[in-house]
Image (cartoon, coloured by chain):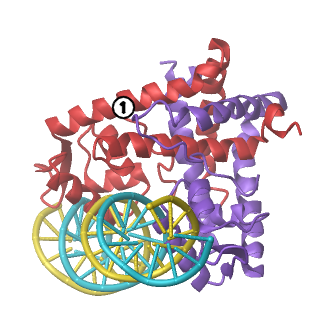
Chain colours: A red, B purple, C yellow, D cyan
Amino acid sequence: MPSQSAGLGFVDALVQTSFLVQSVLTKAAARHELTVAQVRLLGILRDREPGMLQLAVHLGLDKSSVTGLISRAESRGLVRRIPDLDDGRAIRVSATALGRRLTEEVDGEIDAQIRALGDVLTMAEHRTVGRLLSKILIAGETTIAVVPPPDQHRDAVAGDRTST
Amino acid sequence: MPSQSAGLGFVDALVQTSFLVQSVLTKAAARHELTVAQVRLLGILRDREPGMLQLAVHLGLDKSSVTGLISRAESRGLVRRIPDLDDGRAIRVSATALGRRLTEEVDGEIDAQIRALGDVLTMAEHRTVGRLLSKILIAGETTIAVVPPPDQHRDAVAGDRTST
DNA sequence: TATTGTTATACTCTATAACTATA
DNA sequence: TATAGTTATAGAGTATAACAATA
């Protein structure tokens, strides 16, 4: 049966790959006592100090979910809540030195392992994957809000990898 | 800056795409009162009646996690535990008619939405994505067990999409 | 003894609803 | 009133460790 060698269909390939990548992320994070959500969070905080609402939008989560996420990360010394001088209601979230160090370590591992998966591809194929998936991502950023239910917010659904 | 038009790097593209796909899965599942884990489970049960351990391996989970997953799915009428006639200790998990119906519905939506993401690609690019990601998946099935920690089990880490 | 599965326990993650404090 | 964030509550998902029953 040619199903393996000929390649899966477009949809199956994307879905299965997403599980594979998530599995890599989960295990890499776990090796440093982190969760995928925390790695995502720390990635965003690499070059920003967003407020809770901005974080919620970036992560595609409810603000109350972010409160919990930040509280747990804070109690582990990964991030810090700092007051927003311009708005008494708001706070800003900042990565600690520990948080930054762990992100770098984990990101390095993730990079190495994902790249290792790509070792079966040629250089050109490598670039092709990056290019074609980027096109899909751009489509996704706008599409997601439209296709599903009528009352969908166009959250930053994809989620940043590290910074970007 | 060419970063957008030129495409992300290989790693970033894969990671971000995995989040996008997972987001599609999560929302499609939720629209039918299901979770991603349940959709994965039901996908496996499309053409099999595995035991708990086999399920654990397929899903890359601990057997105790599978017990909970099955129990919740069972109490929702999605699956059923049936005795294994050959082994008094074992049971086999089977999808109910409801479970099968819901899987089909959700899978249809997922298919449509993922395919919609691919609408920005040409036919040829479509096939290329399927082909290249398939190569990565094959690599992942073996690699995952090797790259990380020394004591890693070679679980079926990727996770089936629907059947296969 | 080894294997199959469950239970007890503990976290993380997530959402909804209601609430506080500031704008 | 509207906005930023938190709290209370609830449920899913996951893991580890200890256990029961069968092989």
Q: Nearer the viewer, residue A129 or B86?
A: B86
| For residue B32, above or below residue C3 | below
Apparent side of residue B131 relative to residue A61 in the rendered image (left or right):
right
Tell me what residue is drawn at x 50 percent, y 45 percent.
Answer: A22
| For residue A103, above or below residue A125 | below
Residue A149 coordinates in the image, percent (x, y): 63, 66
Label 1: state its secondary structure.
helix
**Mark 1: few, some, or many residues within 10 Å (few <14, many ≥20)?**
some
Determine which residue is flagged by label 1.
A107
Apparent side of residue A129 relative to residue C16 in the rendered image (left or right):
right
Apparent side of residue A112 relative to residue B55 in the rendered image (left or right):
left
Tell me what residue is drawn at x 18 percent, y 46 percent.
Answer: A79
Residue A93 coordinates in the image, percent (x, y): 20, 48
- Dividing the picture into quadrants, the one containing residue C22 is bottom left
| For residue A116, above or below residue B27 | above
Q: Is residue B8 visible?
A: no
Q: Is residue B92 visible?
A: yes
Tell me what residue is drawn at x 15 percent, y 55 percent.
Answer: A75
- Dividing the picture into quadrants, the one containing residue A18 is top right
Residue B38 coordinates in the image, percent (x, y): 60, 68
Apparent side of residue A72 relative to residue B91 in the rendered image (left or right):
left
Extreme residue in the top direction: A123
Q: The N terminus of chain A lies in which quarter of the figure?
A: top right
Residue A84 coordinates in the image, percent (x, y): 14, 50
Q: The C terminus of chain A lies in which quarter of the figure?
A: top left
Q: Nearer the viewer, residue A89 or A94?
A: A94
Three-letter code for the amino acid on which mark 1 is drawn: Asp
Q: Which chain is mark 1 on?
A: A
Q: Nearer the viewer, residue B3 or B31?
A: B31
Tell me what residue is drawn at x 23 percent, y 42 percent.
Answer: A49
